[in-house]
Structure formats: structure tokens, C-alpha cells
Amino acid sequence: MNILWLTPSIQSYPMPTIALLNGHCYAAGLMLAMTHDYRLAPSPRGYFCLPELNYGLPLTPAMAALFRHRLPLKAPTALRDLALEALQLNGQQLVDMGIADALAPAGLSDALAFIESRKLTEKAKTGVYGTIKAELNKDLIGEITGQGLVEEEKRFKEVSVRTQERIEFGKVWYEQWKAGKAKL
């Protein structure tokens, strides 16, 4: 499932968006949550993970861009932990890392309290909320749409081909080495 086609629309949506996570959030579910302005994590249940590494699936340029742009600067290891270690994080860890804004153990009532405490229903009334969001997210939008995406996909494909060639060369070299024919 490719949810990234939604990202530009959500990144410039003229109202605050909130992802109320009510359980496990893996792969595309976590990507969809990351497109929102706010994320509320469940407690005590629910794990969050990018399991692509475990299944041998690469993060495409658009997928990686979303996480690069949306993960907080105060958690520089968050991207590594999610993408390169496929760690399962719980709701409290998400909040501690700044990935989620708060815990919502009671679900909808906690979400409504969060909206009220931040006065989010008032934010879009001036009519510029979406414009401000689009400007703040312009680099992400540019990277996952139009020419930016075409260029990134081309670069990704070239890197993938070179990587596969190196893997094949390594296999041949190893077989030659085992047979005593490799030259060092």
C-alpha cells in the first residue's frame, strides 16, 4: 500500500491534523501517522516499528524523505533506531523521542482534551493555516512530488543497480577465493 500520495495534501491541509493511534502502528501505518501535525500514542498497548529491514525491503526515496523531514531534531537517533534497527517502540518511547506529542490511554477523550488544551479548533480560522503548513513542509512536498520525486527515484534505482552489482561481484570473488583462484 502506498500512502505517500496523500502526503502533499496532508502537509498543506488547511486545518490541524491529528493521528490518534490506538494500537500497533507498523510500516505504512507509521508512515501515515507521520504525515499528521500531531500524533497521540496509546498506552500501555501498541508498538511502533518500520519492519522493512527485517523483510529485506528498502525505504524508497519518498518514504525516507517523510521520516527525515518529520522526525524531530531533538531525537537524532530516532531515524536510525526505526530504519536501521527496526526497533519496536512503545507509546511512552515515542513521546520521549518527540515522535508522538502525548499519550492517549483513554483514546478519543484524551484526543479531545489534547485538542482543547492546544486550542486547535481555533487555529484554522484565520485562513492561512494551510499556507503556513505548506511553506514549512515545502522541502518534503518538493521531494515527494513532481520533478523532485522523478530525480530521487532515478538516483535510487542507480544506487540499487550498483549495490546489486557489488553483491554479485562479492559472490563471484568469494567462490574464486574458496577454490583458491582469487588474486589478492
Image: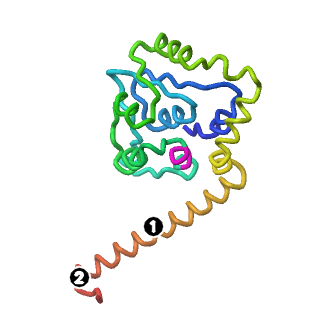
Residue sitting farthest toward the right: 127
**Mark 1 surroundings: few (<14), some (14-19) or many (≥20) residues within 10 A:** few
Mark 1 lies on residue: 164
Q: Is residue 130 left or right of 103 when viewed as pictured?
A: right
Q: Is residue 37 above or below residue 145?
A: above
For image coordinates 65% across by 33% down, the residue present is: 10
**Residue 148: image location, x then y, percent:** 68, 55
Residue 70 is a magenta residue: no
> For the residue marked with disc 1, what is the amino acid?
Gln
N-terminal of the pair, mark 1 or mark 2, is 1
Q: Is residue 136 left or right of 165 when viewed as pictured?
A: right
* Badge 1 vs badge 2, beta-carbon distance below 8 Å: no
**Residue 37: image location, x then y, percent:** 57, 31
Quarter occupied by residue 99: top left
Q: Is residue 63 above or below residue 110?
A: below
Q: Secondary structure at mark 1?
A: helix
Residue sitting farthest toward the top: 109
Mark 2 lies on residue: 179
For image coordinates 53% across by 41% down, the residue present is: 70
